[in-house]
Amino acid sequence: MENPELLSGIPLLIIGIIGLVIAFGALGAPERAGASTGAVRVASAHPGPAEYVRIGIVLGVITAIEVALYYIDLSQNVLISVLIVLSAAKFLLVVLWFMHLKFDSRVFSTLFATGFVLVMLLFVVVLATLDGALV
Amino acid sequence: MAQAHAAGGHLETSTGLDNRKLLMWLFLGSECLFFGSFISAYLLYRDRNLTGPYAADLYDIPFTSVSSFVLLMSSLSMVLALAAIQRGDMRGLRIWLICTALLGITFLAGQAFEFTEFNREGLSLSTNLFGTTFFVLTGFHGAHVTVGVLILLSMVAMEARGQLTPEHSLQVELAGLYWHFVDIVWIVIFTLVYLIQPQ
């Protein structure tokens, strides 16, 4: 590539795409059955302890993979892209299961996704216009 | 409209949602921007230093990895505390709340150790741009964890006095939302600040 600095935009692009996927997923999802609608809160719609423990184990394993990747001699752009995807996976697991966005009203998802999309825009705009980069 | 208590334990609202939970999500949405600004500033300024020490000379990735794991597991214990109160298991609630607070305190102790080590290596808030942005970002995160620990300990005290019953599960859920948010902020910080370093 003639301008290698353009490669630093790839991770930013990944972050932006992940943000948009989360936002549109939240805005476009149908109202979940058992969500907090009407006057009735259905706590039983949340997963049980066994599922939470399974999610916790997955989170621990992903963290171990991230740290292992840090010590493997990978190209910087591949490393950054993989780390961001793994980090996004952990983020989504916590938000969707532990914070119950997967099971609660989509109004909550919309509020959170709005802040998240704005911050993704902030990342891209600030780093792009002020010559910032992830690497 | 908002007069009668609904079956879910909150006042009836025009949205059908508990306003306290709505407010918490709105707050968390705004917190995204709060931390996003600091993370952007860090990424922008970390390698524009006139003097050292630099990030690569200071970071202890194995140590921070353990801290990150501790905070992740505190999220697990927090959600188990919520599951306990939702099924009326107050002993389980007490155990998991204490466990979460202890894990949070462990994380804070690790952060205090890290800050002390960095300071011993010559990095302070005013040493260089890396120091300024790093300490502001992680310091504010640590402050949030501290507030979370205080909330958890308050809940343990309330439970001990019998002021926290299964009817108050929403309070534990709100505390949990805050705690999980602090955790996801660290997930982002761990990757963008610690694991991804300039070459």
Image (spheres, rainbow, N blue to C red):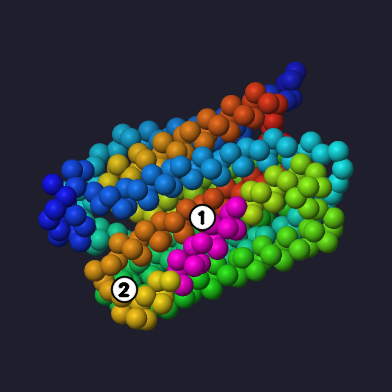
- Please determine whether, in this image, residue B174 is positioned above or below residue A89: below
Residue B182 is labelled as: 1
The region drawn magenta spans B140-153
Q: Residues within 10 Å of mark 1 (few under 14, many from 20)?
A: many
Q: Which mark is residue A59?
A: none
Residue type for callout 2:
Leu
Q: In this view, does B72 lie to the left or right of B165?
A: right
Q: Where is residue B185 in the image (x, y as percent from the top left)?
A: 54, 50
Is B101 displayed left or right of B20 in the figure?
right
Between A61 and A109, the residue placed more toward the observer is A109
Say whether residue B165 is visible. Answer: yes
- In the rendered image, the vertical position of residue B89 relative to residue B115, given as above or below: below
Q: In which quarter of the image is residue A53?
A: bottom left
User: CB atoms at circles 2 and 1 under 8 Å apart?
Assistant: no
Position of residue B178 measured from the top left corner of the image (x, y, whole percent):
44, 56
Name which quarter of the figure residue A81 lies in: top right
Q: Residue at x 25, y 52 (%)?
A: B18
Residue at the spot x=58%, y=33% of the render?
A: A123
**Left or right: where does residue A86 sit relative to residue A104?**
right
> Disc 2 or 1, which lies upstream in sequence?
2
Q: Is residue A116 left or right of residue B45?
A: left
- Report the mark closest to the observer, 2 or 1: 2
User: Quick one: SS at disc 1?
Assistant: helix
Predominant SS along the magenta part = helix
User: For the residue labelled by badge 2, is the local secondary structure a helix, a strand or a loop?
Assistant: loop
**Residue at coordinates 52% horizontally, 36% vertically from top-left?**
A119
Residue corresponding to mark 2: B164
Look at the image and say whether residue B141 sits in the magenta stretch.
Answer: yes
Say which amino acid is labelled 1.
Val
**Marks 2/1: CA distance?**
23 Å
